[in-house]
Amino acid sequence: MHASKFSLPGVRRPLKYGLIILLCLVLGGFSGLQAKDYGGLEQQRVDAIFPGSDKLSEPTGEFKVRTIGTGKEVLGYVFQSQDVVDIPAYSGKPINMQVILDTHGVIQDAYVLEHHEPILLIGIPVEKLHAFDAKYKGIKADRRVVVGHSSDPEAVTVDGISGATVTVMVVNEIIMRAAHKVAVSLKLIEDKGGATQKPATVRQDFYEPATWEQLTGNGAIRRLNLTRGQVDAAFKGTEAEGVDNASADQVDETFIELYTADLNPPTIGRALLGDNQYRFLMQDLKPGEQAIAVLGRGLYSYKGSGYVRGGIFDRVQLRQFGNIISFRDMDHQRLSDVFAKGMPEFTEMSIFIVREPARFDPGSPWSLELLVRRQIGAVSGVFSSFELSYQLPEPYLLRPPPSAEELAAIEVANRPTWVNIWYQKAFQIGILCTALAVLMVILFLQDTFTQYPRFLHWLRRVYLVFTVVFIGWYALGQISVVNVLTFAHALFENFRWELFLTDPIVFILWTFTAASILLWGRGVFCGWLCPFGALQELINEASRKLKVPQFELPFALHERLWAVKYIILLVLFGISLESMTTAEQFAEVEPFKTAITLKFDRQWWFVAYAVALLVINIFTRKVYCRYVCPLGAALAIPSKLRLFDWLKRRKECGTPCQLCAKECEIQAIHPDGHINGNECHYCLDCQMTYHNENKCPPLVLKNKRKTRDKPAPVPEHAELIPVVQVFEP
């Protein structure tokens, strides 16, 4: 590159814009959902899986899980993946799925509610995605599921969707991670990979004197306050609506003020019960049993007047991990004496004993459910439940340290999705990196390789075949202008590195392309690493071998047609500002998805377009690349920043010699002899001519002059004849 390029007025601004564009190219190959109403689709899926269900609860808990049931029987659980995991897909936006689990933690349905994947919006019918989702029915949430082949005999394998490998791998992660988290939280399966697999225990060695205010302040005692108006609102839309409703001046009256606490920690138990009562209580408890204090006041009794000896308390129950723990009279102790300083007066005070330590973990969240019943007939009534959530403060707990196996499992389970994808594509990554290393050797030693044109021609053909077959059809590494547009929008929306790393093949190719642009310009990608470009070149090469006539446009027209691809790029960018989905549709001007990603398995009009471009290419090399390709235009812009100009030229190039310009099959050499770096595909044909002493006219002429001016050789056995100089008198 000549120094004068950096001294022209106004060059700083183009360089600044060029750097921005270059950054887009480095990351361009890569790019939450709010809860939405999907027109009853969620309910339709529930009805299809559990046709006998007649009850669907409101979303509860951290993951907004809804319980499916019939009568008092629980059939399963349903949730949306966006409430559980935040895993971006190939488009940079999460895929929202509805997953249904049965009571054993087995997936009964996984259905995509919303996605923004380009390959599925245009290219692959959505029916294929739903067919893929259906393969998860019957898989338990604690199983390891792998898309494609796996060497792990215990793993469940599912076939992917051709052309959407990254998308289905992300879908797999979304389904299994979300199902596992929810199933663990509901205690449907064991958390084999989590540090909380073993239940926590209460620390008996930790005690600090505390008042009622301190215990309510740190969460050791939790409160639920219900007004009559809130209870009336809970029965709206039911048969009990309007029954026993409060008047306008009564809606703010306290219906019940309810408190609960775990009494096992000494700080809580001794503060509420006193030392002696606490000691006697702990002596009566078996290992693992928990004493739960329930205190209430107001118009409503949490015990109720209908309770009889030997029966079950029907107004309070404890729920954890989806398990419901009810209390009988043998689990209940009346609490009469309390000692906490500052404690208010209560009309009811009880201790309930949780006698199922195998189903209860004091270190995990649980809730006390208050059931309110309203009579609607002689014997029938309607229930509404209210939850008082509880979590024992961490200082009162002792959690067992995980084992080495558990730590290893935790590390695997907590790995980001993109890391798992890189592990699964380790073979492809290794082959690609090796191939790129070979290409780097060729480029750095191009002066040496171009002196052996026959070898370099065959080496290049083999590399182009590798690009089409491995990078394109096998690894699906066809880069598109959509990648550039996606990254540009990610800069202004939700920029996250993991968005760019979900497809390792594309990420590596983009990184290499960005580096090669700085050193050599756009030609390295377009001439060596673009699968569709390589396919065109191989087809044209075969047609030339078969003596198919070749046609070229006059250079003046050819030069003006270069602008078409830049116009297409600007139009696509403008459309993307309004709608990225629409821009992806118009980006079908690229035949890459049809010819490479989907291997021509598509609607006939897309196939006809791609085939037409390849047929034209038989007679004129790379027409699409030269005049239409918006990706080529995007790569050409930052090519102005290349640091070196390694393609050698002579002063005779262009004037008078036109050999390289005539031989350049994409007409990237101007009549004046200079190479247009924006259009060059770095095939190195001109460099092979440059070093060929029998072909390059300046070299041929130079050799002729050397031969003409060289003195005639002296015969080996010639006699030496003395020369006598004769002087004129």
Image (cartoon, helix red, strand yellow):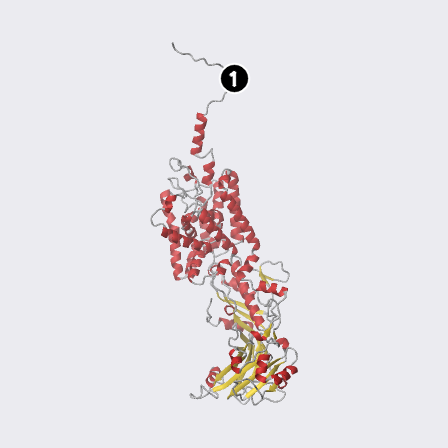
Q: Residues within 10 Å of mark 1 (few under 14, many from 20)?
A: few
Q: Give SS at disc 1.
A: loop
Where does the image place residue 191, in percent across and percent down from the top left?
60, 69
Residue 284 as seen in the image, left or right of residue 392:
right
Q: Which of these two is toward me, 498 or 653?
A: 498
Judge left or right: residue 331 versus residue 34: right
List the residue tagged with mark 1. 718
Q: Is residue 589 above or below residue 38?
A: above
Residue 230, placed above or below residue 538: below
What is the count of numbered marks?
Answer: 1
Q: Where is residue 37 in the image (x, y as percent from the top left)?
A: 46, 71
Residue 688 coordinates in the image, percent (x, y): 47, 38
Quarter of the image with the C terminus in it? top left
* Amino acid type at mark 1: Ala
> Can see residue 374?
no
Check the picture and name the quadrant holding the N terminus: top left
